[in-house]
Image (cartoon, coloured by chain):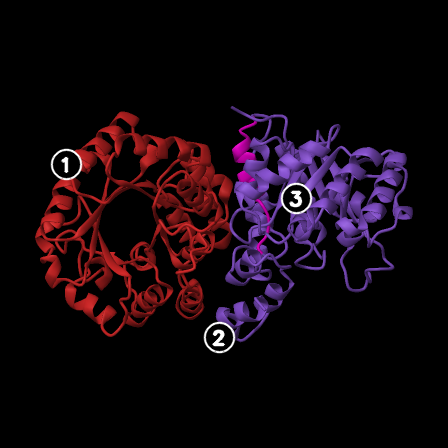
Chain colours: A red, B purple
Amino acid sequence: MHRDNVKVVDCTIRDGGLMNDSNFDIETVRAVYKACCEANIDVCELGYRNSKEMFDPAEFGPWRFCDEEDLRKATDGIGPGRTKVAVMMDAHKSNPDDLLPASESVVDIVRVATYTKDINQAVRTCNAATELGYETTINIMAITHVHMPDVEACLDQAEEETQASAVYIVDSFGYMYMDQLHYMVAKYQMHLKTKDVGVHFHNNQQLAFANTMEGIVNGATWADGTMNGLGRGAGNCTTELLMSFLKNPDLDILPVLDCIGKYITPLKKDIEWGYHIPYFITGILNQHPQSAIRQMSIEDEAEKHDYVTFYTMVDE
Amino acid sequence: MHRDNVKVVDCTIRDGGLMNDSNFDIETVRAVYKACCEANIDVCELGYRNSKEMFDPAEFGPWRFCDEEDLRKATDGIGPGRTKVAVMMDAHKSNPDDLLPASESVVDIVRVATYTKDINQAVRTCNAATELGYETTINIMAITHVHMPDVEACLDQAEEETQASAVYIVDSFGYMYMDQLHYMVAKYQMHLKTKDVGVHFHNNQQLAFANTMEGIVNGATWADGTMNGLGRGAGNCTTELLMSFLKNPDLDILPVLDCIGKYITPLKKDIEWGYHIPYFITGILNQHPQSAIRQMSIEDEAEKHDYVTFYTMVDE
């Protein structure tokens, strides 16, 4: 069978930007966007539209802000075919005033990322985007650290108070097993009568793709991936694995493989993403990867690979 | 829940030996064995007991042959606690005459690896080992390349003609999805009335651990892993992920993490195992990883990462 009801969302530049402060050169961003268009990927997320009052433009690259001018540089003369452009707004780090009317913008979809505690801000941002003409999603982060009644309240708010197309399960810490995911998908479906379920997973336990598949098999219809898994820490479900699984004849994997070989794999010289023991440790302990990212940045090899000390430190 | 009925088999030295012609130094082998003993891992596989007539000892290291003298050097003064020592014999590349009586050997378990076509030789080797006092398993390789009636015939022979404790599903090419694995586990269980089911998976599609979990959830009770996934090509289910999943309080993960940090991670300087696009490509195409291993060995970076040419070549 093939699954043509699943929207493939490539967020290589957005999630990968968490590993390089969103400092991709323009050639890489154009190559990723072009590959998405040629591959017939549904959505290409080109970065964050976060606030310059909360992130210093002297420290962060253009894809943390996605100014319209930069987005035009990234997309001019390419596609778009059926590929829509998305940006992500962190509910607590963005300002709806930074959105133009959709008709004047390169952006088609605004994805609002939120912790459960910030859901009211997320709803406000989401509705502001809807009024300006954008399609929207709400991405509930760090889902394994949240009291379940809070998740359910968020889902009810998203359902009743927004026009979001989809609400995402985001396993920020890479903690979930497949049976735990089943539980969450069922919970989402119970509360979201008129919206789709999305899935975005991290690879701390090498389960990002497996969980994405399981989510899809159980009814999720928006699925995030990044090329070669590029993303914070252990990285993400890979776009190429997701595309291969869907077996949708409209999708063409070769432009994605070409882009990975020329632009993504070479980044490994400077950025160490993917499965590594420190990320495994924070994953199985259901913790934010920040401590593991620090551990991975240690220069002394023996200290960097002293996993027992690291485990003991984070398991306090 | 925890699963104390599952035997953890660490085959770091055996499967990892496919990446370095079994040329581990004695310190590494002793460290892996010691970690297994301290971690209370059930079985530590220290290499192949293959024939010196088929592998040249000038080309291959000691762990391709596992002479008793070398095994004693690897294990003297350590453990064993509950950890048993295993070796693997390839049905078509080994000689049962190379086995001493079990009472005179360091080895407890002989695992016979076979293609379906070599099942008669595998049965003979397995029975020779049983007669000498060893516990045995039969590991059916390349299971996704085989006509199903041939698999069923192998299972019936293993069931009726041997005393093997377990028969393994080995996804040599890393091709299987979880639903295909369900099918295979059910098939094995139908034919194996008196024997356990074992699982050994490769990580071409980042599913080695997910499939191992699914196998266990569906009744497999022997599960293979290697430390940090070290193994041919894309590598294996990792021992640390497997241990963490089982949540068996008898298992101690810290000695394994210590060994990985000191002995396994440093091997990455010389051996490039794990998820890489060429292994992904042979995996989704259900092919032997040999072509991908050659692709990974190309020195010119642009040629090595020309995944489109590689894909087109192997998809003929």
Residue found farthest to the top:
B1
- Looking at the rendered structure, the kind of residue marked 2 is Ala
Q: Quadrant of residue B131?
A: top right
- Looking at the rendered structure, the kind of residue marked 3 is Val
Are tags 3 and 2 found on a single chain? yes
Question: Above or below — where is A216 with respect to A98?
Answer: above
Disc nearer the start of the sequence (3/2): 3
* Residue that numbered label 3 is attached to: B32
Q: Chain of mark 2?
A: B
Q: Quadrant of residue A56?
A: bottom left
Q: Quadrant of residue B225?
A: top right
- Which residue is rendered at x = 20% and y = 66% of the image? A71
- Looking at the rendered structure, the kind of residue marked 1 is Glu
Asked whether residue B247 is drawn in magenta, I would say yes
**Whole-Å distance between the Cαs marked 3 and 1?**
56 Å
* Residue that numbered label 1 is attached to: A161
3 and 2 marks in contact (CB < 8 Å): no
**Whole-Å distance between the Cαs marked 3 and 2?**
36 Å
1 vs 2, front mark: 1
A40 displayed left or right of A87: right
Q: Chain of mark 1?
A: A
Does residue B102 appear in this view? yes
